[in-house]
Image: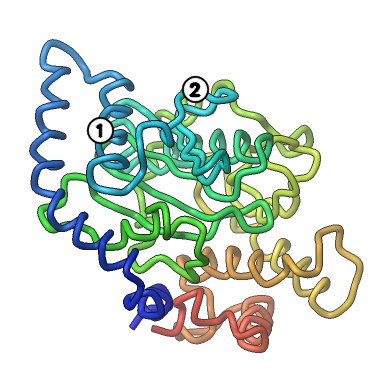
Amino acid sequence: MTPCDAATEQYRQLASYRHCVDRIVDAWPAFVAQRSERLRQGLFGAPVEKVAENILEDLFTRVLDWTLGDVNLQVGRADIILSELGVKRLVLEVKRPGSLTWHRRYVDAALDQALGYAASQKVGAVAVSDGEMLYVADVVHGGLRDRIFVNLAAHDPPLDLWWLSVHGIYRPCPQASTPLPELHVDTATTQAASKGELLHRKYLLPAHCFGYLGRADDPGTWKLPYLSADGTPDLKRLPKAIQAILSNYRGAKVNIPRDAVGDVLVRLGKTAAELRRMPCQGGITADVYVEAHEALDQLGRLPDVHCCE
C-alpha cells in the first residue's frame, strides 16, 4: 500500500468520500465521451487552449463536486482557480490539447508559471493540464509534492481524483499513488519553451531547476540549483546542492528554513536516484550520496525517494 493509499484509507468511511467516488465512477464514461467531442472542435486546426479549459470545467463540475461558481477563470493571470466559499484552493495552468503530454520541458515551464501565480495569490496547490494529462501538486517550501497524476483519456475512472474534490483538496496527501512520470526531454524546443520565463539573475535558470524556492515569483529567493535548463540533472551542481543541505542538517548556516530541509533533500535524492547514484541501488558511489542516504533515513524520508525498491 502506498502512503497515499494509506492516507486515503482513513477517509474511506466518510460519506463525502463514498459519494465522491460513486460520482466519479458513474460520470467517467460520459466525461470521456464528451472529452472526445470537445477535441473534435479542433477538427479544422490544432485544438486551442479554450478546448482544454472546457474539458477541465467538465471534469470539475460533472465528475467532481465543484460548482460552476467555484471554477474561476483568468484570476490574476492564472487560467483557472478553484475556490470554495471564497477560499482559493488550486491554481491551474492550462495549455492547448497535446502540448504538455510527455514533454518535460513544457510541463516544467507550465509548473513554473503556476507556482508564480500561486505565490502571488497565496494558494497552496498547483496543477497543469492540456486536456490530456492532469498533474496536481501541493506547494511545500516553495517546491512541489505530488498529489495526483491523471490520464484524462483513461478507460477506467481514476479514483485518485478524490484528492482534487471539494472535500479532498484541503486534506494532506503524503504522496501521490500515481506521481508525475518520467517525461521526454525535448531539447530542440528548450529555447522556445523558456521565452518569457523568470530566470535567476546569477544562474540564468528557471524556477524548476532549483531545490528550494522561497517565493516562486521572486528569483532572488531561489536556492540550490541542481538541474540544467532543459530539466536534466546537472552532474556538477547536484552533489553541491546535496552537500549544502547536509551542512544545514548538521547545524551549519545555510540560508533556507530548517523545516524545509527534509522536503528539499527528498527532491534532490529523487534526482540522484534517477541517476542510480544512491548506495542502495548497487555499485560504488560518491560519499555525498551515501551521506544523503543516511540523512534521509534518519529523517524517515527515505521511502519518499523510492531508491531502495
Above or below 117: residue 286 = below
Q: Is residue 186 left or right of residue 18?
A: right
Neighbours of disc 2 within 10 Å: few (<14), some (14-19), many (20+): few
Above or below 49: residue 304 = below
CA separation in Å, label 1 and label 2: 16 Å
Which sits in the foreground, 105 or 169?
A: 169
Q: Earlier in the sequence, mark 1 or mark 2?
A: 1
For residue 237, which quarter of the picture?
bottom right
Disc 2 marks which amino acid?
Answer: Gln
Q: Is residue 19 left or right of residue 36?
A: right
Residue 183 on image: x %, y %? 35, 49
Quadrant in which the N terminus appears: bottom left
Which sits in the foreground, 303 or 120?
A: 120
Which sits in the foreground, 178 or 223?
A: 178
Going by the picture, which residue comes out furthest to the right? 253
Residue 203 on image: x %, y %? 73, 39
For residue 7, which quarter of the picture?
bottom left
Residue 245 on image: x %, y %? 75, 68
Write down the residue under mark 1. 55
Element carrying mark 2: strand
Going by the picture, which residue comes out furthest to the top? 44
Residue 173 on image: x %, y %? 47, 67
Disc 1 marks which amino acid?
Answer: Ile
**Residue occupying the point 50% across, 50% down:** 232
Neighbours of disc 1 within 10 Å: few (<14), some (14-19), many (20+): many
**Residue occupying the point 34% across, 55% down:** 149
Which sits in the foreground, 273 or 74?
A: 74
**Residue occupying the point 55% across, 33% down:** 113
Write down the residue under mark 2. 74
Quadrant in which the C terminus appears: bottom left
